[in-house]
Image (cartoon, rainbow, N blue to C red):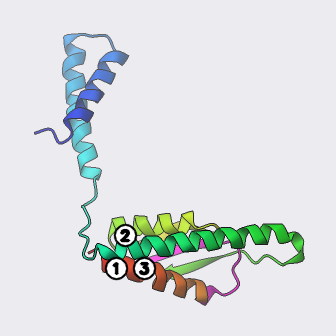
């Protein structure tokens, strides 16, 4: 059985468009297309099991408010110029989240919030390296990430 028939068909058509249409290229292109579909299927992560759907709205509202607040804070920081000392830095946040989808959502949240960026995840240590534009209190940043986002994601995704 072909896991992604449309993808396999598209790969076969692309193969035939890039090469001459011969019986050999049709057979070889078919083999490449089928194995390409299987390769893509093996890369697909498991679907997350959503335990508490109603908490998704709460998470979205928190993220929306945080993005608005961060936009205002970054704009104020940029407008104040050199009058205020900038203290950008890197922090390491220990995470309890292990599900790949939850980690991806956390990365999107932290990167879409102005003033912070998800840089690297250490699967062995279960930590994430984050760059913060205006790092005043590292412990406060860690506590905010763990309590505002991680706790909700742990409740939402199984």
Asked whether the beta carbons under mark 3 and mark 1 sit within 8 Å of each other, the answer is yes
Please give the range of residues in magenta: 125-139
Q: Is residue 112 above or below residue 82?
A: above
Taking depth in this image into account, of 74 and 47 the one nearest to the observer is 74
Residue positioned 69% across, 80% down in the render: 135
Q: Is residue 147 magenta?
A: no
Gap in angstroms between the C-alphas marked 1 and 2: 8 Å
Q: Position of residue 108 (x, y in %)?
A: 48, 63
Numbered disc 1: secondary structure: helix
Q: Which residue is mark 2?
A: 102
Mark with earlier residue (1, 2): 2
Please tell me how crowded label 3 is: few (under 14), some (14-19), or many (20+) other residues with Cα within 10 Å.
many
Q: Are marks 1 and 2 in contact (CB under 8 Å)?
A: yes
Local SS, label 2:
helix
Label number found at residue 150: 3
What is the secondary structure assignment of the residue under circle 3? helix
Q: Marks 3/1: CA distance?
A: 6 Å
């Amino acid at each position: 059985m072909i896991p992604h028939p449309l993808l396999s068909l598209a790969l076969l058509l692309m193969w035939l468009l890039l090469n001459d249409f011969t019986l050999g290229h049709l057979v070889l292109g078919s083999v490449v297309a089928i194995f390409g579909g299987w390769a893509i299927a093996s890369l697909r992560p498991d679907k997350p099991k959503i335990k508490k759907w109603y908490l998704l709205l709460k998470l979205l509202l928190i993220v929306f408010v945080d993005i608005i607040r961060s936009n205002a804070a970054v704009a104020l920081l940029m407008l104040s110029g050199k009058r205020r000392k900038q203290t950008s830095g890197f922090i390491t946040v220990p995470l309890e989240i292990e599900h790949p989808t939850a980690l991806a959502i956390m990365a999107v949240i932290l990167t879409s919030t102005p003033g912070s960026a998800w840089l690297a995840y250490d699967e062995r240590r279960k930590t994430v390296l984050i760059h913060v534009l205006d790092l005043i209190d590292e412990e406060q940043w860690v506590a905010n990430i763990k309590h505002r986002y991680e706790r909700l994601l742990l409740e939402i995704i199984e």
